[in-house]
Amino acid sequence: MNDVPQLPEDPPHLLRTLTNHPAFQLASFIIGVTGITLAVFFYFHSKHERQPWYYVQPTRTSIVDRGLAVGEKIKILYNGEPLDATNVSALQIQFWNAGLEPIRSTDVLLPIKLLLPEYTQILDLTVVKQSRPEIVKFKARADKDSSGRQTNSGTFDFTILEKNDSATVQVVYAGPPNASVQLSGAIIGAAIHRLSVPLEAEGRRSGGTLIFKIALLFYLPFPYMVFDMIETMRRRNNRIGSPPKTSIWKKKRFWVVQIPWTALSIAIYYYLFLRPEQIPPNLLM
């Protein structure tokens, strides 16, 4: 019986060889994950939203302190009338838009109010500095009650606040230097945030980035998945059985990659979600 001649095997196709190579598959995986991550990042980074912020300068000036001997010797007139306040103080508050979406006067649903404690009176509000005054037209006025007396509130008004447009307002009020200060009001699609202390912000990012935050945290074990995938492909290509293999946690090269990668992921997370809001440079000059 004659043996049937065996036809020679076709040489492996170059493209098939390339696409089946572990290095190519690993590169494709990295490019895919990186592309998705960058797409999500740039989406949120370029997302247009209004972000009104304000900051109360911690340094305040005590103009009159009746507790001091010299305070009894000073007589203060306000609009020609004697002022019997125990203390008169001054502070500065800064207000700006940190978002990409402009805030127009028509976007303000409820007036932006500066509020001090009820036992105080705002005597004067002065805009001492603002960006692009001919465009922003930021104004501040002290509110009065029905009888024309000064109250503990003031109102801010402006034409438009684009990104980093800002104003610094000086507040002179009858009350102690440690009086609390806050801003209230309602703006379409935004909440007014307070910068509590320099370089420390509250609620920098909106809840819309929650999914991205979780995804980024899951991105931390990326080197582990890569090493495990390489080992799986190596065994499959070499037709190795499945005897117990050395734990990936005991491999030095794994930790050489994992530790810097974890540090990088944490740094990205901090930059995106925990990095404090910055006061616009035009307010610091």
Image (spheres, rainbow, N blue to C red):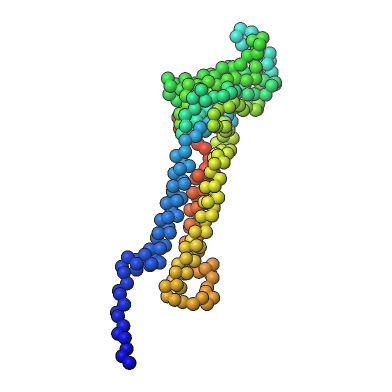
- From where the camera sits, is residue 282 visible? yes
Q: Where in the figure is residue 178, as x and y percent of width and height?
A: 65, 27
Q: Where in the figure is residue 128, as x and y percent of width and height?
A: 50, 21
The residue located at (54%, 75%) in the rendering is 244
The quadrant of the picture occupied by the C terminus is top left
The residue located at (33%, 92%) in the rendering is 1
In this rendered view, identify the residue nearer to me: 232 or 177: 232
The single residue placed furthest to the top in the displayed view is: 80
Relative height, residue 16 to residue 221 (above, below): below
Q: Left or right: where does residue 210 sit relative to residue 17?
A: right
How many discs appear? 0
In this rendered view, identify the residue nearer to me: 16 or 228: 16
The residue located at (46%, 77%) in the rendering is 240
The single residue placed furthest to the bottom in the displayed view is: 1
In this rendered view, identify the residue nearer to me: 220 or 175: 220
Q: Where in the figure is residue 46, as x and y percent of width and height?
A: 44, 39
Q: Where in the figure is residue 39, as x and y percent of width and height?
A: 44, 47
Q: Left or right: where does residue 49 sit relative to residue 28?
A: right
